[in-house]
Amino acid sequence: MIPELVRIHDVIDVVISTLNARDPYTSEHSFRVALFSELLSEQMSLPARTHQRLHIAAHLHDIGKVGVPDGILNKPGRLTEVEKLQIQLHPRIGFDILQRLPTFREVARIVLHHHERIDGLGYPNRLHGRQIPLESRIIAVADAFDAMTSDRPYRRGMPVETAAEEIARHAGDQFDPEVVAHFERAIDLLATHVQSGQEPTRLPGEPDHDSLMHSRIASAA
């Protein structure tokens, strides 16, 4: 099991390094989404295998953004309708990349559906309710929470309390109410990690990302 995890996390390390070289924000965002997803998984007492799949999928959920033009990915303003459609291709691109690796086929399905909505108005397949994998429903909440609370060059992040209210307001349409209920119970812990900037815990055999963190700090200097 440990050698397999080492191989898996070698792949993850390469992917994250590639994302970081192209778009440091997406790389950092993926770390935080993985952390928040893990905290929710622990709050929900999910089985170890589900927790592991979630950990990997959360790290890789935005890998499809390698197929989105830089001008759209880093645009400091509102996207046009055409640009929104291009951004919405990234779950499918991520799926196409990951499904080529037999070990990642379950992860690929989670990545494909992380922008679906409970009410069926998400993308790419307009799944609804429990048609959406549980791991995708968890990542959807973690993804939105980090997007709202993160600072960007063109705006300040929301306060944690405001972001939590937005998540709660969309329980039942955008987000799974059960996941949101666990999110609300874990909000104090999530807020602590937002403030501390802590990285996700590593699974056995996962590489240390200190060197990647140093490169991010250097690039931000």
Image: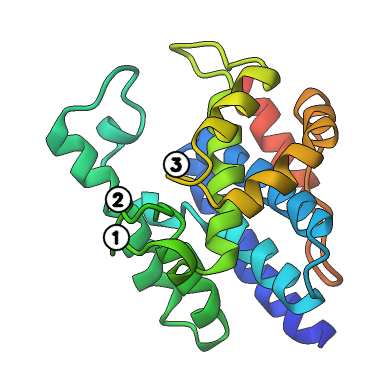
For residue 28, what is the image quadrant? top right
For residue 161, what is the image quadrant? top right
Dot 1 or dot 3: first in sequence order is: 3
Q: Which residue is mark 3?
A: 22
Comparing labels 2 and 3, the label whose residue is closer to the camera: 2
Name the secondary structure under disc 2.
loop
In this rendered view, identify the residue nearer to me: 115 or 95: 115
The amino acid marked with disc number 1 is Arg
Residue at image point 35% right, 64% down:
127
Q: Which residue is mark 2?
A: 121
Name the secondary structure under disc 3.
helix
The amino acid marked with disc number 2 is Leu
* Gap between marks 2 and 1 measured at Cα: 5 Å
Name the secondary structure under disc 1.
loop
The amino acid marked with disc number 3 is Arg
Dot 2 or dot 1: first in sequence order is: 2
Q: Are marks 2 and 1 in contact (CB under 8 Å)?
A: yes
Q: Is residue 191 left or right of residue 81?
A: right
Placement of 38 over or under 198, stated as above or below: below
Q: Is residue 106 left or right of residue 3?
A: left
Q: Which residue is mark 1?
A: 126
* Gap between marks 2 and 3 measured at Cα: 30 Å
